[in-house]
Amino acid sequence: MQKTFMAWGAVIMALSVAIGAFGAHMLEDRIGVDAMAVYETGVQYHMIHGIAIIITGLAAGLFGESRKLFWAGVLFIAGTIIFSGSLYVLSISGVKWLGAITPIGGVSFIAGWLILMSSALSRKKV
C-alpha cells in the first residue's frame, strides 16, 4: 500500500504540473477568464490531493497498513479524477452538466480526509 499510494501520488502530482502548465500556456487566451478560473481550481485541488495521496502512503509506512488508510487513498484518487477531471472538461468544452458531477469528487475528498483523521485518531502510539 505504501509504495502504491506514493507512486500514485507522484504520478498525480506530475500530471497536475503538466495540466497546469498546459492551461497557463495553451488555454489562457482561448477559453476566457471565467473558464480559466474553473480550470485553475481543478489544478489546485489536483495538486493538494496528490500530496494527500503521498501522505497516505507515508502514513501506511509509518503506522502500518489499514483499511482506513486504503480507503482514504482510494477516495483521494477518485476525488481527483472526478472533481478535477470534470472541471478540466467543463472549462475546455463548456458542457455545463459536468458541473453536476463535480460535487461527487468533492464528497470523495471530504470522506478521504475524514477517514484519514479517523485513522490518525485510532492509533495507539505515533
Image (tube, rainbow, N blue to C red):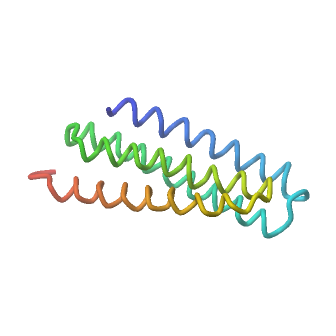
Q: Pick the residue in front: 43 or 58.
A: 43
At x 65%, y 63%, the residue is: 99
- What x and y, as percent, mark residue 91? 76, 58
At horizontal 28% and vertical 45% (from top left) the residue drawn is: 69
Quadrant into which the N terminus falls: top left
Q: Residue furthest front?
A: 97
x and y percentages locating residue 63 in the rendered image:
20, 42
Image quadrant where residue 12 sits: top right
Question: Splitting the image into 4 quarters, where does residue 61 fall?
Answer: top left
Query: Quick one: 59 or 100, which is closer to the camera?
Result: 100
**Residue sitting at the far left:** 124
In the displayed structure image, the side of residue 32 where residue 39 appears, left or right: left
User: Which residue is found at the position 79% from the left and 59% from the top?
Assistant: 94
Q: Is residue 33 left or right of residue 112?
A: right
> In the displayed structure, would residue 69 be above or below residue 94?
above
Q: Position of residue 14 (x, y in %)?
A: 60, 39
Q: Is residue 33 above or below residue 93?
A: below
State the residue lying farthest toward the top: 3
Q: Left of 9 or right of it: where is 17?
A: right
Expressed as whole percent of the image width and height from the top left, the position of residue 62 reads 24, 41
Residue sitting farthest toward the right: 29
**Badge count:** 0
